[in-house]
Image: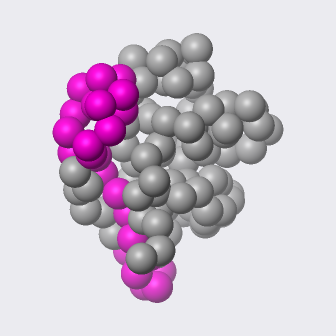
Amino acid sequence: MPLLFSYGTLQDPAVQKATFGRELTGHPDALVGYSLTLLEITDPDVIAVSGQTHHPIVTATGNTGDRVPGTAFEVSDDELAAADTYEVDDYHRVLAPLTSGAQAWVYVDSPA
């Protein structure tokens, strides 16, 4: 099963239930080479699910010393597709390294 790393709203059980139809099982980990900021969300459907108008977003720094804590979840391919639908266009999914040595799918800022 693929890994999906979340540093934001996909860690919330209510968001997981709304997006995947279940609560996910995961373990703490950290994303390597990224920094975290906040993004204003304007999509009313996403705001309704998360209850938040600002979501965290990560940007690649190129510095392997930078870390963003979060959770690595095992998901199915169908659940990855559901996560793609949940995330707004400001995010895109990439495969990235975690401090555990695993590779996980993660949503990062979309290129300008």
Q: Quadrant of the N terminus?
A: top right
Q: Is residue 112 above or below residue 20?
A: below
Q: Is residue 12 left or right of residue 38?
A: right
Tell me if residue 13 can be seen.
Answer: no
Q: Quadrant of the C terminus?
A: bottom left
Q: Is residue 86 magenta?
A: no
- Colour approach in the figure: one colour
Outermost residue, bottom side:
62
**x then y, percent, for residue 98:** 57, 61
Q: Is residue 39 left or right of residue 74?
A: left
Kindly identify the residue that appears in the image at 20 percent across and 39 percent down. Answer: 53
Q: Which residues are magenta?
A: 41-66
**x then y, percent, for residue 65:** 41, 79
**x then y, percent, for residue 64:** 47, 80
- Of the pair 97 and 54, the residue shown nearer to us: 54
Place residue 24 in its image quadrant.
top right
Q: Is residue 61 magenta?
A: yes
Q: Is residue 87 left or right of residue 84?
A: left
